[in-house]
Image (spheres, rainbow, N blue to C red):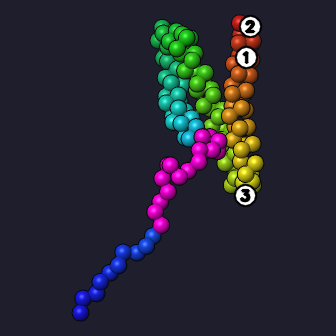
Amino acid sequence: MARYRTKAQRPLSPHLQVYRFTMTMMMSIAHRISGAALYFGTFRLAWWLIAAASNERYFNHVNELFASNVGRFILLGYTWALIHHMLGGMRHLLWDTGGGFGKKTLDILAFGTLIGSIALTILIWFVAYWVRGQI
C-alpha cells in the first residue's frame, strides 16, 4: 500500500517588506561596513609602516599620497570606522551581559553609537591638527 506524504506546513520566512527599518538595524549594518572598512584601512596602515621601514625616498612618496586631500579623506573615514566599530563592539559587549535590551535603551544606544563616533572622530582630528599647530 502506498503512503502519501503531505508537505509539512511551516511558516514562511519574513522578507524585507515585513521588517520595519530601525536605528538598531542601521547601526548593525554600519557596524559590518565599518568592519570591512577597517580591513582595507589596515592594509593602508601596513603599507605606511612598510614604507617607513624601507627607505626615505619611498616613505616620502607614501607620505605625500597620504597627505593629499584624498588620502586625508580616506584617513578620516578610517578614523570614523575605527571609533564606530569600537563603540558598536562596546554596545554588543553590553548586550552579552544581558543588559540594554529595552526598546528605549536600544534606540539610545544606537543613536549614542552614531553620535559618539562622529563626535570622537571630530575631536581626534581637531586635537591632531591642534598638536601639529595647524589650527
Q: Quadrant of the C terminus?
A: top right
> Is residue 12 shown in magenta?
yes
Mark 2 or 3, nearer chain start: 3
Q: Earlier in the sequence, mark 1 or mark 3?
A: 3
Q: In percent of the image, x 60 and y 31: which residue is there?
A: 81
Q: Residue 75 location, x and y as percent?
A: 58, 21
Helix, strand or loop status at disc 3 = loop
Q: Which residue is mark 2?
A: 135
Q: Identify residue type, mark 1.
A: Phe
On the rendered image, what quadrant is the N terminus found in?
A: bottom left
- The residue indicated by pointer 3 is 98
Residue range corresponding to the magenta coloring? 11-27
Instruction: Give residue 122's quadrant in the image.
Output: top right
Residue 81 visible in the shown view = yes
The circle drawn on residue 126 is 1
Q: Residues within 10 Å of mark 2 (few under 14, many from 20)?
A: few
Which mark is in front, 2 or 3?
A: 3
Q: Amino acid at mark 2?
A: Ile
Locate residue 15, reporting x and y percent: 48, 53
Kind of element beneath mark 2: loop
Mark 2 and mark 1 in contact (Cβ < 8 Å)? Answer: yes
Q: Say what secondary structure mark 1 lies in.
A: helix
Q: Amino acid at mark 3?
A: Gly
Residue 29's tag is none
Residue depicted at 73% across the width and 32% down the height: 116
Q: Nearer the viewer, residue 1 or 50?
A: 1
Is 42 left or right of 82, judged from the image as shown?
left
